[in-house]
Amino acid sequence: MKIVAINGSGTGTKGVTGQTLESVMEGIRESGVEVEQFILNDLKITPCTGCGTCKRTGQCVFKDDYPKIKDAMLASDGVILASPNYISNVSSQIKAFLDRSFCFLFHCQAMNGKYGAVVVVSGGPQYQPVEDYLLHVTGSMGCWKVGSIVSATAQMEDTDECTRVMDEAQALGRSLVKAVQTKQAFPEQEEERSTTFEVMRWLVESTKDEAPFEYEYWQKNQSS
């Protein structure tokens, strides 16, 4: 079993996002499971230009670090998406990564049936749009949404609050591992997942002439 963590913080492992994510990963490691972290700020992820080459050929025109992250995710059993709250949205680093993933992880539903969790850090109380968005993205990839953890910068300055949040983060990591191990289903997510899957099927089939790679992928992997 393997979990992939995507760290979208501009401060990498040094800030509160990195600290909170590390606690989630500690919970995973305590369960004896390998976790691989990708720190997007230390990697080169070129913003998508919408050229559509990936839909046609399965290959992106940009030669950067995106493929190794994508391949690690596809080989994993679950993923953690972590981002700070920047003006009621995710960081530019993780948004660039997600935009590059529209063909492989969203249209093709290549993560379908895997598991996901979300980490959000906010300096203030208006974090809900970011948490909702990342959970939506996790589900749109076809993953079961195991849960999320939100932490605030101020909490890290209070010993008791910091301990509570980090304990909660570790518990999320353990829950992610347990969900993978038991092949846990979340009945309340069934309708949303089914709708997303069928929408992506319709999209790919209706654009098969302009997106032959996606169509062939579905015929081989998602036909049932």
Image (cartoon, rainbow, N blue to C red):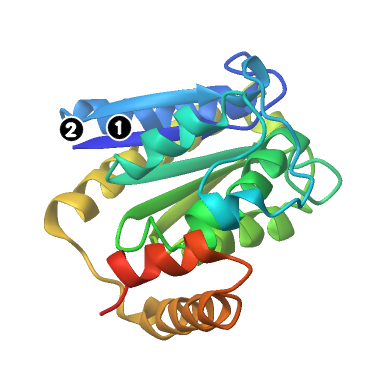
Q: Is residue 167 visible?
A: no
In the rendered view, does 188 fall on the left or right side of 81? left
Residue at the far front: name it. Answer: 209
Residue at 61 percent of width and 29 percent of height: 17
- Placement of the C terminus among the 4 image quadrants: bottom left
Q: Is residue 43 visible?
A: yes
Assess disc 2: are there few (<14), some (14-19) or many (≥20) residues with their C-alpha within 10 Å of its C-alpha.
some
Q: Which residue is mark 2?
A: 31
Residue at 49 percent of width and 54 percent of height: 105
Q: What is the three-letter code of the residue carrying label 2?
A: Ser
Circle 1/circle 2 CB separation < 8 Å: yes
In the rendered view, does 144 fall on the left or right side of 97? left
Assess disc 1: are there few (<14), some (14-19) or many (≥20) residues with their C-alpha within 10 Å of its C-alpha.
many
Residue at 63 percent of width and 62 percent of height: 132
Q: Which residue is mark 1?
A: 27
Element marked by disc 2: loop
